[in-house]
Image (cartoon, helix red, strand yellow):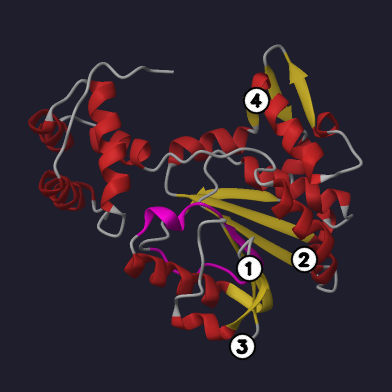
């Protein structure tokens, strides 16, 4: 992992310049991202690349491929398999039994990053004998992390923590049943990857692309301002089948949004909601 080479600072006025510049150069709009989050991420890039503000602007405009790299680094999110085991236990005990009544089950993992959540969902489906009639779409704006997700190959050392999460979720199985260890890598088993499609989707600008029975978007909305959160939550509402479920992160909620009237709260603490109208 690259180390920061120094301490670099950027003002909120300069952040607005970067947001404006990037939109004009690449069409990618960061205007709905919270400024505190952008500040941290931009300063991280400046440190890694040893750039001051002027260098950064010049690179975005003049350095071939830099604005693509910049967008990828801005959008990198931390993820892991079976993160928040209580959430997966709730899915297993309350949500998946309900979804068994559907002939086909379509799931969308939005902001899926490197795919660990998608494969966690695939394991739940397999354990509940739903794999053959379920399909998972994993989307992100970052092609770099999607490439990792598509391969389903992760550092083996990460699976100690993933196994702890899995055991806390209370499965009767062992996580090692779902991957093959080879040297220092863990490869997700082929049967788990069959009914999964990873593709690019920008929550800030793209539209509905299917109808889903379950949507998970955990720890993504916290990086958006209220206006963009409103847009994305409405996108999820329009993408859900009637009586479908929306799952957000523990620090996210739809309670303050008007669309909440169209949802039933399934679990307030875990932020799981069901579309009722």
Magenta part of the protein: which range?
206-224
The reply to whether dot 1 and dot 2 touch (C-beta < 8 Å) is no
The reply to whether dot 4 and dot 3 touch (C-beta < 8 Å) is no
Task: Please give left or right for residue 4 compared with residue 175 in the image.
Answer: left
- Magenta-span inclusion, residue 276: no
Q: Secondary structure at mark 4?
A: helix
The residue drawn where x is 66% and y is 19% is: 157
Above or below, 8 relative to 3: below
Q: Quadrant of residue 73?
A: top left
CA distance for labels 2 and 3: 18 Å
Query: Which circle's residue, 4 or 3, is located before the other in the chain?
Result: 4
Image quadrant occupied by the C terminus: bottom right
Disc ID at residue 268: 1
- Magenta-span inclusion, residue 211: yes
Mark 1 packing: few (<14 Cα in 10 Å), some, or many (20+)?
Answer: few
Task: Please give left or right for residue 203 compared with residue 39 in the image.
Answer: right
CA distance for labels 4 and 2: 28 Å
How many numbered markers are drawn? 4
The residue drawn where x is 76% and y is 59% is: 90
Mark 2 packing: few (<14 Cα in 10 Å), some, or many (20+)?
Answer: some
Residue picked out by circle 3: 277
Residue picked out by circle 4: 158
Disc ID at residue 137: none
CA distance for labels 1 and 3: 19 Å
Q: Secondary structure at mark 1?
A: loop
Mark 4 packing: few (<14 Cα in 10 Å), some, or many (20+)?
Answer: few
Residue picked out by circle 2: 95
The reply to whether dot 2 and dot 3 touch (C-beta < 8 Å) is no
Query: Which circle's residue, 4 or 1, is located before the other in the chain?
Result: 4
CA distance for labels 4 and 1: 30 Å
| Residue 26 coordinates in the image, percent (x, y) | 23, 48
């Amino acid at each position: 992992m690259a180390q920061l080479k120094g301490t670099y600072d950027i003002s909120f006025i300069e952040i607005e310049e970067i947001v404006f510049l990037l939109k004009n150069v690449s069409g990618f709009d960061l205007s709905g991202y919270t400024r505190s989050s952008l500040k941290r991420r931009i300063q991280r890039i400046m440190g890694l690349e040893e750039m001051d503000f002027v260098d950064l602007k010049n690179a975005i405009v003049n350095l071939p491929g830099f604005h693509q790299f910049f967008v990828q680094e801005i959008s990198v999110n931390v993820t892991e398999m079976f993160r928040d085991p209580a959430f997966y236990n709730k899915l297993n005990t309350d949500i998946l039994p309900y979804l068994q009544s559907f002939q086909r089950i379509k799931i969308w993992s939005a902001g899926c990053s490197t795919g660990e959540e998608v494969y966690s969902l695939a394991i739940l489906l397999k354990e509940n004998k739903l794999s053959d009639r379920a399909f998972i779409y994993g989307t992100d704006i970052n092609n770099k992390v999607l490439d990792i997700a598509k391969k389903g190959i992760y550092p083996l050392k990460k699976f100690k923590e993933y196994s702890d999460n899995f055991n806390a979720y209370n499965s009767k199985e062992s996580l090692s049943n779902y991957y093959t260890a080879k040297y220092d890598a863990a490869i997700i088993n082929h049967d788990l990857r069959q009914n999964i499609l990873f593709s690019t989707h920008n929550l800030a600008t793209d539209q509905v692309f299917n109808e889903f029975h379950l949507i998970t978007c955990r720890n993504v909305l916290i990086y958006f301002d209220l206006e963009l959160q409103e847009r994305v939550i409405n996108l999820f509402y329009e993408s859900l089948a009637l009586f479908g479920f929306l799952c957000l992160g523990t620090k996210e909620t739809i309670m303050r949004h008007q669309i909440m009237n169209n949802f039933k709260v399934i679990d307030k603490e875990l932020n799981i909601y069901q579309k009722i109208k």
